[in-house]
């Protein structure tokens, strides 16, 4: 193993660690190969009157048995299988360099077996000189080992590639989960700060109202903590949390806000990222209700459309009294940017978030792939 980097080598994968289906396939191919060799030998000597019917069976059978034992020994006790599969010539050389020894062992055991079987059957096994046999069998074994080492190399390369792909997928999954946790951790303090700021507005003017808001906040935090431990929730749970938040904000801005809920019953069980809609509703209050002296109408809707969950948060505004802050522009602002990044991390291109400005209203539309719990 001189010249290789042990830290970059592929881990040794013993035969027992191969998938059962793959092992059965290799064993089947091996048996079929030797059956074919025996059939060809019998066929070639069928019309030869000097060859008895059992002799081709002895020749190829002894070869099959000895080669099988040698191959098992090479792959059972050889520690060089963990060389980098990206250097195939090095891998092949580490196996084929033992060819002279393997060929000598083959000649000794295979031909010794033939001599013994012939003697038991009262016949004499004759062959060319031992040197000629050794050279001839070495050439045959070189072709044979080259063929089967190619098959084994392909299998090991396939298994290593699959294992590497699994590691990459696991790393990507871990990275995505870490990103989602970071986004969620960024959202929760922001969410709490804005809610407490709402309550603080009444601490010195209406104590009873502030106390009622604190009770509502406790319910809201209890629900948000329960959902915050999970990456995805049912839409019904998300709407329940959203109603608690809307109650607090409506209490603060009454009677300048009116909320309409248009939630389709057949969409309630669909799974979605937790705490996704709260920052969007927060934007509706911040850029719609707070900046308008007129009554603002907010609509929260959901429906199933062509295998997707479509979510809508819409707030009315008057252009003479309300201006959208830069934070509400697409791609900017903590809330919208956070939602977009979470959707991208979870769904990739299968989900979208768009902000549409009309003459009398602003709409945020979220579309997610429909996934049952």
Image (tube, helix red, strand yellow):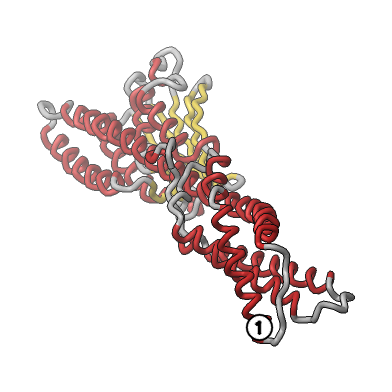
Q: Is mark 1 on a helix, strand or loop?
A: helix
Q: Which of 286 and 292 is in front in this view?
A: 286
Q: How many marks?
A: 1
- 137 shown above or below 46: above
Where residue 177 appears, x then y in whole percent? 36, 41
Q: Which residue lies furthest to the right in this view?
A: 47
Q: In which quarter of the image is the C terminus?
A: bottom left
Question: Seen in the image, is 31 located left or right of residue 192?
Answer: right
Q: Which residue is drawn at 49% across and 26% down?
A: 355
Q: Which of 236 and 82 is in front in this view?
A: 82
Q: Which of 111 and 186 is in front in this view?
A: 111
Q: Which residue is drawn at 21% across and 40% down?
A: 217
Rendered image quadrant of residue 342: top left
Res. 263 in view? no
Q: Residues within 10 Å of mark 1 (few under 14, many from 20)?
A: few
Question: Seen in the image, is 190 located left or right of residue 300?
Answer: left
Residue marked by disc 1: 119
Question: Seen in the image, is 104 located left or right of residue 181?
Answer: right
Where residue 321 appears, x then y in whole percent? 39, 14
Rendered image quadrant of residue 107: bottom right
- 245 shown above or below 336: below
Res. 105 in view? yes
Q: Which residue lies furthest to the front in this view?
A: 129
């Amino acid at each position: 193993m001189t010249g290789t980097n042990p830290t970059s080598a592929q881990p040794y994968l013993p035969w027992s660690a191969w998938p059962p289906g793959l092992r059965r396939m290799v064993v089947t191919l091996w048996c079929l190969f030797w059956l074919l060799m025996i059939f060809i030998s019998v066929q070639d000597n069928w019309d030869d009157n000097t060859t008895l019917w059992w002799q081709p069976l002895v020749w190829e059978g002894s070869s099959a048995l000895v080669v099988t034992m040698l191959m098992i020994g090479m792959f059972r006790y050889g520690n060089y299988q963990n060389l980098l599969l990206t250097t195939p010539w090095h891998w092949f050389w580490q196996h084929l360099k033992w060819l002279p020894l393997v060929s000598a062992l083959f000649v000794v055991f295979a031909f010794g077996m033939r001599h013994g079987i012939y003697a038991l059957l009262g016949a004499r096994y004759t062959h060319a000189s031992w040197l000629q046999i050794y050279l001839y069998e070495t050439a045959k074994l070189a072709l044979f080992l080259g063929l089967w080492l190619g098959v084994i190399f392909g299998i090991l390369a396939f298994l290593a590639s699959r294992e590497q792909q699994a590691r990459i997928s696991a790393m990507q999954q871990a990275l995505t989960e870490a990103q989602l946790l970071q986004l969620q951790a960024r959202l929760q303090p922001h969410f709490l700060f804005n809610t407490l700021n709402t309550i603080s507005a009444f601490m010195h003017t209406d104590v009873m109202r502030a106390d009622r808001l604190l009770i509502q906040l406790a319910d809201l935090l209890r629900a948000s903590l329960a959902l915050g431990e999970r990456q995805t929730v049912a839409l019904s749970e998300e709407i329940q949390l959203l109603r608690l938040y809307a109650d607090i904000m409506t209490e603060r801005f009454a009677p300048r806000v009116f909320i309409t809920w248009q939630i389709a019953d057949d969409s309630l069980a669909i799974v979605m990222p937790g705490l996704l809609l709260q920052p969007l509703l927060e934007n509706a209050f911040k850029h719609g209700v707070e900046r308008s002296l007129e009554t603002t109408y907010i609509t929260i809707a959901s429906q199933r459309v062509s295998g997707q969950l479509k979510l809508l948060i819409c707030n009315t505004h008057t252009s003479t009294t309300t201006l959208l802050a830069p934070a509400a522009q697409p791609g900017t602002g903590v809330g919208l940017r956070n939602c977009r990044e979470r959707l991208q991390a979870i769904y990739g291109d299968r989900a979208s978030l768009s902000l549409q400005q009309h003459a009398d209203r602003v709409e945020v539309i979220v579309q997610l792939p429909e996934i049952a719990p």
